[in-house]
Amino acid sequence: MIIDQNKINEAVSTIIGYGGDHILNCVQCGACSAVCPGVRAGFPLLCRNLIRYLLNGQLEEIIEDSSSWGCQACNRCTEICPQGVRPQEVVFAFRRYQANQLAFSTSSITSQMNLFETGHAVYTDPREARKKVGLPEETPTSAFDDAAKKEIQTLINNSPMGELGLF
Ligand code: SF4
Ligand code: SF4
């Protein structure tokens, strides 16, 4: 592979700009990938592999990859990394970059719709289960708070996501 220092600089500064501050500390040991449930579930570009592509300057080449949407934000990678890279932050930085370029994975559309409609990216109606165990049916969250929902929708509508015309 031909090394293009300009592309490397651009990729690293983009990821740092979106919050992946410690990407340059990575020594590619692979500990993060070994504990990542997303990697185990078959998303190839999380943790070490994602960082390798970015450190090689291949930011644009992987913009359409859907792996970043498979991150569960469990932070197992953050706990195990010996270099303080905080790989989850690199994954989220890459995801922010993708979102700002409107490079959404189709697998993420349902979670975007849930977020807009309820304030939760992952949402199932909790009322029946809560009723069964004697809890108030409605959760004290944005899902049942119209003012909070409206604020979330205003933020989404004024972000690059709003330009997608999904909502
Ligand atoms: S554990 Fe840390 S140093 Fe090792 S590959 Fe992952 S991010 Fe890089
Ligand atoms: S936070 Fe994301 S990238 Fe890190 S181990 Fe969990 S699923 Fe994998």
Image: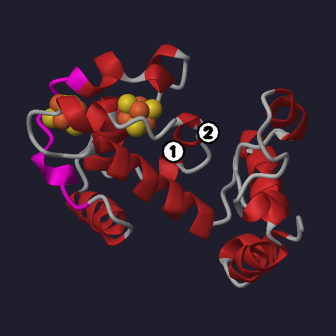
Asked whether residue 142 appears in the rendered view, the answer is yes
The one of 19 and 63 positioned closer to us in this rendering = 19
- Between marks 1 and 2 in the image, the one whose residue lies nearer the viewer: 2
Asked whether residue 46 appears in the rendered view, the answer is no
The one of 88 and 103 positioned closer to us in this rendering = 88
How far apart are the two marked residues, 1 and 2, measured between alpha carbons? 9 Å
Give the dominant element type of the magenta stretch: helix, strand or loop.
loop
Residue tagged by mark 2? 66
Which residue occupies 18% across, 55% down?
22
Q: Quadrant of ligand 2?
A: top left
Residue 134 pos. (x, y %): 80, 34
- Relative to 117, residue 56 above or below: above
Residue 11 pos. (x, y %): 33, 60
The one of 151 and 39 positioned closer to us in this rendering = 151
SS class of the residue under badge 2?
loop
Locate residue 101: give its quadrant: bottom right
Asked if the stretch drawn in magenta spans residue 27, the answer is yes
SS class of the residue under badge 1?
helix
- Relative to 4, residue 86 above or below: above
Please tell me the numbered disc located at residue 25: none
**Magenta highlight range:** 21-31
Residue 151 pos. (x, y %): 72, 81
22 sits left or right of 147 in the view: left
Residue tagged by mark 1? 62
Q: Is label 2's Cβ within 8 Å of ligand 2?
A: no
75 sits left or right of 42 in the view: left
